[in-house]
Amino acid sequence: MNKMKSVFENDFSTIKTLGDMAGYIKNLLPSEIPADYAIKPIFTSIEREVNIRNGILALKDFMNQLYDIIIEDGEKYDKPKPTFIPAGKKPSIPIDFPFIYHIKSVLLNIGYNSDLKDGVLTFSGLKTLTPIICCEGMPAMSKISAPKLLTCLRFLNECGMYFEGLNLDAEKLNMASEVYIEVMYPDNPVLLTGLKIMSVAQRDLKWKTYDEIFLRCDYSAIFV
């Protein structure tokens, strides 16, 4: 099986808005994922293969929904200055469309830093969610601010993800709190297995520049 194309290998000349970028990445999601494929031991040490495969399928569906919401209504979550991308220049997700990059980073931080048990991800402390994760899988020097983190969590809640232990209706988050937070996805709990696996893939495997395997749910990263 061949690896999928990285985010900017296709034509990017039509990307001008946040919705354009979401639609562009959505089109890079796999159209089909095989029912059976061999999985690298680094991942089977986390969860059974059948749950991993089902989790990746659920993650693809979740990301598809996430992009649809951004395309339809993303402006209420992110009100950037009008973006002008010169002809021939590749758009930069972290610079031109930071909302997508922050959402990706929060999801990666949840998946990577949490414990998975019985369809629930558990982590301690909101500061765990603030590192911005580069496409190579490493944390950047900058972090997500508390107001922007709250915006991201509210957006993920709209996507069907629930955070037990957090009050998302509060005016601001208590970033100093070390309370344990449980992440749930009632519509299809196995999604959280897929989130865990693809977070490990993005963080622990080495990728070339712009290889955003998580954003496009590149399942080929996990098979042997």
Image: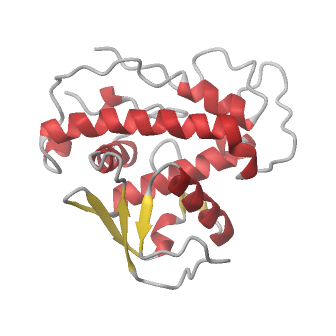
Q: Is residue 207 above or below residue 9?
A: below
210 relative position to 40: left or right: right
Q: Is residue 91 above or below residue 203?
A: above
Residue 156, percent across and down? 52, 54
Residue 23, percent across and down? 62, 27
Q: Residue at x 20, y 43 (%)?
A: 43
Q: Viewer-proximal residue, 42 or 80?
A: 80
Which quarter of the picture shows residue 42? Answer: top left
Residue 214 appears in view? no
Q: Quadrant of the N terminus?
A: top left
Residue 182, percent across and down? 35, 68
Q: Viewer-proximal residue, 14 or 70?
A: 70
Residue 114 appears in view? yes
195 relative position to 132: left or right: left
Q: Residue at x 54, y 27 (%)?
A: 26
Q: Residue at x 37, y 39 (%)?
A: 59
Residue 181, percent across and down? 38, 72
Q: Is residue 150 above or below residue 156?
A: below
User: What colouring style does the render use?
Assistant: secondary structure
Which quarter of the picture shows residue 10? Answer: top right
Q: Quadrant of the C terminus?
A: top left
Query: How many numbered discs, if any?
Result: 0
Which quarter of the picture shows residue 82? Answer: top right
Q: Residue at x 75, y 19 (%)?
A: 14
Q: Is residue 21 above or below residue 157?
A: above
61 relative position to 224: left or right: right
